Structures are given as C-alpha cells and as structure tokens.
Image (cartoon, rainbow, N blue to C red):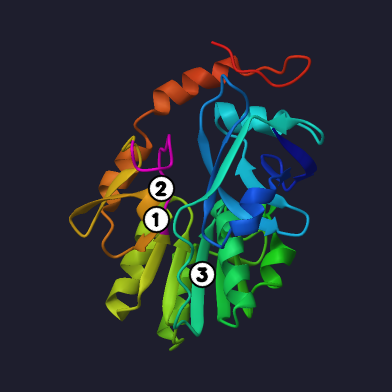
Amino acid sequence: MYKIVNKRQLNATVTMLEIEAPLVARKAQPGQFIIFRIDEFGERVPLTIAAHDKEKGTVTIIFNNVGKSTKMLGQMEVGDALADFVGPLGVPTEMEGLKKVLIVGGGTGNALAYPIANGMHKAGIEVDMIAGYRTKEIVILEDELKNSCTNLYLMTDDGTYGEKGFTTVKLKELLDTGKDYDAVVAVGPPMMMKFVCEATKPYNIKTIASLTAIMIDGTGMCGGCRITVGGERKFVCVDGPEFDGHLVDWDELIKRGTFYRDQEQEANKHVCRITGGVRQHG
C-alpha cells in the first residue's frame, strides 16, 4: 500500500498529492510517469511524476479531478493509501547537448512541464517557459515555475493575469525577436501541442512533445497508447512519453484521445465515497 503523506489543493479542480513510494522515488527522473490504482476494483491511470524525494522516499503527483478515478483520488486524504503505484515508467527527458530551451505549457499541462523545467534548470540548462491558462482562477505552480526558469511568460486567454493571449502567440513573438533555442518542449492539450509544433516548424527548431494517451499496462503489451510518429507505430508508455513533435500524427492522436468520451461521461455518474475508503462500483 502507498500512503498519502501530504495533500495540497492547487485550484478548484487540480490536486497535488505526495505519496510514500521509496522504490519509485529512488529511480525517478524528469519526464517519467507512474500508473496508480486506487484499489483492487480500480482502473489503471497514468500520471506524470511532478517531483520526487529520494531521502523521504516520496513521489509527488498532480492531477485534474475530471475523470472517475481522478475524482475518487481527489477525495482521498492524508493517511489513506493506494493499492498500486507502479513506476517510474517511460523514457526520461533527454537533456544532453542542450544549453537553452523554451518550454510551452498549457493548463494542467504546466504540472507536467514543471518537473521537466526543474530538471533542466538543475542540470544547468537555461530555461525559458511560456505557461498558458484560460483565466487567473486556474493558475497553478507560479512560484515553482519561476524558480525553475530564467524567464517565465505567464499568459491567460482572457487577460485576467499575466499577458493576454495564447501560448502560440507568445511563442511566435519570441522566435520572431531572434531568441535562439536549442529546442522547444510542448506539454499540454494535444491541440495546443499540435499548434506549437506547427509554429516552430518554419524556424527549423527541434520540438519535443510530451504526450499522454489511453494506457493500461504501461509495458507496450496492450497497445492502447499506440501512436504514429514519422509513419511508424510507437507506444507512448515505452517509447515515450516524449517524441519529435514535427513527426507526430496529431489528427490520429486527438481522435484516439476522445474515443471513450461517452463511456467516461457515463462512469462519472457513479462516483461515491464509502466509509473506510474510496470504492469504485458499477
């Protein structure tokens, strides 16, 4: 069992949990993820490792309370425990040869971008970051991001905080002013990442996309997270989660990501908390 040792609500729907998982914490690296299961009845859900502490033996995850399992996870409190917490999974972020990087995060994707920015910053890489949100009320991790970047450009769609505009507008502005980056890293909703990759292509800048996908076993056996990159079949769980964004078949990825939307909406009608723990029922 994997005990929750700390809980923090980042905004109305985004939660941060620190989990006791010493074996995972010992080997975790930026860019990797875990798969959790609340109990023996739960589904397996992948989440990016937001932080880890080898000395304490803990791993921090950040998630949006939108699906059935994440809503149930968000109802859990300090002292409760998860049945499964498997990881670290996936290929760590490649940092070799990088000196200056621009990271573009969107919405909850900024929680995924944070460990990448922090890891690169600690490795001595100069990091600029564009963090985009719809509005001020959902801004998360502002202080943490500032401490992981040389320059943080905070954007809101409605202009209620930071600069007004989309992340891609700021991206083009920086590139047009002659900012010289070794790579751009996109983390966020697939549509946003697609537009980031389209924006960087004319500048011939290496662009890495950190992908999320429907996933079950995390070993490449189930094939649920398959994608097409450069005309070849890849699996997000074992080949990724980071890929050359200019080679990703974004239309296929976006279509597959909505395949189970109706079933997810139906499952959300049956979320409850039962005395003694959170249980999944049907």
- 231 sits to left or right of 91: left
- 253 sits to left or right of 77: left
- 209 sits to left or right of 81: left
Residue that carries the numbered disc 1 in the rendered image: 240
Identified at 42% across, 53% down, the residue is: 211
Identified at 51% across, 19% down, the residue is: 267
Residue that carries the numbered disc 3 in the rendered image: 103
Image quadrant occupied by the C terminus: top right
Percent x, y of residue 274: 73, 14
CA–CA distance between discs 1 and 2? 6 Å
Above-or-below relation of 73 to 232: above
Disc 2 residue type?
Cys
Image quadrant occupied by the N terminus: top right
Above-or-below relation of 5 to 174: above
Disc 1 residue type?
Gly
Element marked by disc 3: strand
Percent x, y of residue 221: 33, 38
**Crowdedness of circle 1 by 10 Å Cα count: few (<14), some, many (20+)?**
many
Out of 171 and 276, give the one closest to the viewer. Answer: 276
Out of 16 and 266, give the one closest to the viewer. Answer: 16
Q: Nearer the viewer, mark 2 or mark 3?
A: 2
Percent x, y of residue 114: 61, 62
Of mark 1 and mark 3, the one earlier in the sequence is 3
The magenta-colored residue range is 210-221
* Residue 219 falls inside the magenta stretch: yes
